[in-house]
Image (tube, grey):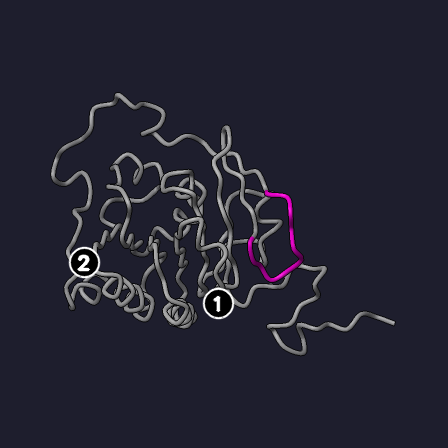
Amino acid sequence: MPLLDVEAIHPDLWRASQLASAHGRTVTSGHEALDAELPGHGWPAGALTEVIVPQPGCGELRLLKTALEAVATRPVFVLQPPHRLQPAAFTWWGLGAENIRVLKAATTADSLWAAEQILRAGTAGALLFWQQQVRPEALRRLHLAAQHADTLLFLFRPTAAAKSTSPAPLRISIDAAPDGVNVSFIKRRGPHRDKPVFVALSPSPVLLNRHAPLDRRSSATPAHRELLPNLVHAGV
């Protein structure tokens, strides 16, 4: 007797022994071993993806390089970045500085509001959002807003957040490793995986040459913008 296609009954159903199909569009990670473990074989657009990091700068942006290149024709929003981004990194990502919108908010509430507005506008290629503390209801609002957009949404959170519940269909953690990162799956629509996936990453230009002179021209990197009520609508 043939096996019943449970996803034909409802898209939120899948066999525990198999990876679920993606609800919408996915964007390849550029790493075959990682794509093989991602539902839909890529990063999901129109959904919240949580990335748990022990500290900023452990390889999370290099891991997303291929995906960011794929959506580079649309604005990429960088919300609450923990460090100032270097112009050389933008070029290495395949992104021009004119495509980057760096936003800094004074409060958590303001940053969450901005994230929702960016997603609801529906024109962003990707939203990279760093946030330490997020209430469960705010996570649900983010995920709901993401479902109305064809945007890659990555929420970067600290290690302690891995123990909390989340509506995100995909939650991963990243740990630095020699010549790359180890990617562990906290949550995905598919079977549990204990062993992390090693992803080899090329060093960024900043890491390759720590003593390279910085380009201090005002046009070299997008300026951080203070968050005003009309900012998100003007930038999208």
Locate residue 91, reporting x and y percent: 30, 38
Instruction: Please tell me whether residue 214 is drawn above or below residue 55 in the rendered image.
Output: above
Percent across and percent down for residue 63 are 45, 42
Q: Is residue 125 visible?
A: yes
What residue lies at 29% left-to-right and 23% top-to-bottom? 210
Instruction: Using the numbered discs, state the Cα–Cα distance from disc 2 to disc 1 in whole angstroms.
Output: 26 Å
Residue 195 located within the stretch drawn in magenta: yes
Quadrant of the image for the C terminus?
A: bottom left
Q: Tag 1 or tag 2, which sits nearer the N-term?
A: 2
Secondary structure under badge 1? loop
> Closest to the observer: 197 or 43?
197
Residue lying at 31% horizontally and 54% vertically, measured from the top left: 76
Q: Is residue 129 visible?
A: no
Q: In which quarter of the image is the N terminus?
A: bottom right
Cβ–Cβ under 8 Å for marks 2 and 1: no
Q: Which residue is rendered at x = 45% and y = 56% of the image? A: 50
19 on left or right of 219? right
Kindly identify which residue carries mark 2: 106
Q: What stretch is highlighted in magenta?
A: 186-196
Q: Which residue is drawn at 41% across and 72% down?
A: 144
Q: Which residue is label 1 attached to?
A: 167
Q: Which of 91 and 89 is in front in this view?
A: 89
User: For the residue marked with disc 1, what is the amino acid?
Assistant: Pro
| Residue at the extreme top | 211
